[in-house]
Image: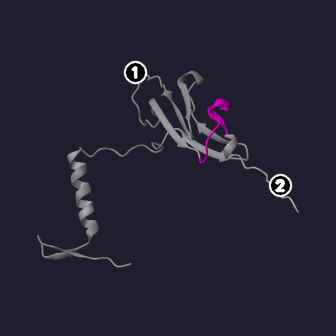
Amino acid sequence: MTMRNFLDWHTGSWRSPFDELARLKAQMDRLYGGAEPAPAGSGVFPLVNVTEDADAYRIRAEIPGISAGDLDISVTGRTVTLSGERKIAPVEGASYHRRERRAGVFSRSLTMPAPVASEKVEALLENGVLTVALPKAEEAKPRQVSVKTV
């Protein structure tokens, strides 16, 4: 791997291109008042696993603390959208030392590899895990073709 150095015209010395990135980051931190980094686990919500068998796709989503009434699942063609609201009651008279759990509205869209029979979709919420069964449309299911001999 080759690393190119650049001439720093202020001092006449050579510098790495990464020095410029570090300088830019420091300026942005000063501009925004040294904004604190996002807490751990602040990625995409909800976390999902998508599996497939011969007949259906299955989405398993971790949604602790969310009731079935706060969820909305919609299927359009090959796209499944999980949306809802996570409500967390504030603790009165207390100051937080760490706040990683987020409250608010969420929406997550997933595209399946093949069309889904939207009229047969079923969902089950159990112990904070949402399982959505998405039966494949008939044209997407594998078919066994018999071979005839002459």
Q: Residue at x 50, y 38 (%)?
A: 108
User: Residue 102 versus residue 150: which sits nearer the camera?
Assistant: 150
Residue position for label 2: 146
Q: Residue at x 56, y 30 (%)?
A: 73
Note whether residue 111 is visible.
yes
Note whether residue 123 is visible.
no
**Mark number, residue 2:** none
User: Residue 79 versus residue 12: which sits nearer the camera?
Assistant: 79
Q: How many C-alpha atoms fall within 10 Å of the one at disc 2: few (<14), some, or many (≥20)? A: few
Looking at the image, residue 146 lies above or below residue 18: above
Asked whether 114 falls inside the magenta stretch, the response is: yes
Q: Which residues are magenta?
A: 113-136
User: Residue 98 placed where, x, y %?
Assistant: 43, 37
User: Residue 39 placed where, x, y %?
Assistant: 42, 43
Q: Quadrant of residue 64?
A: top right
Q: Amino acid at mark 2?
A: Ser
Q: Earlier in the sequence, mark 1 or mark 2?
A: 1
Q: Residue furthest right?
A: 150
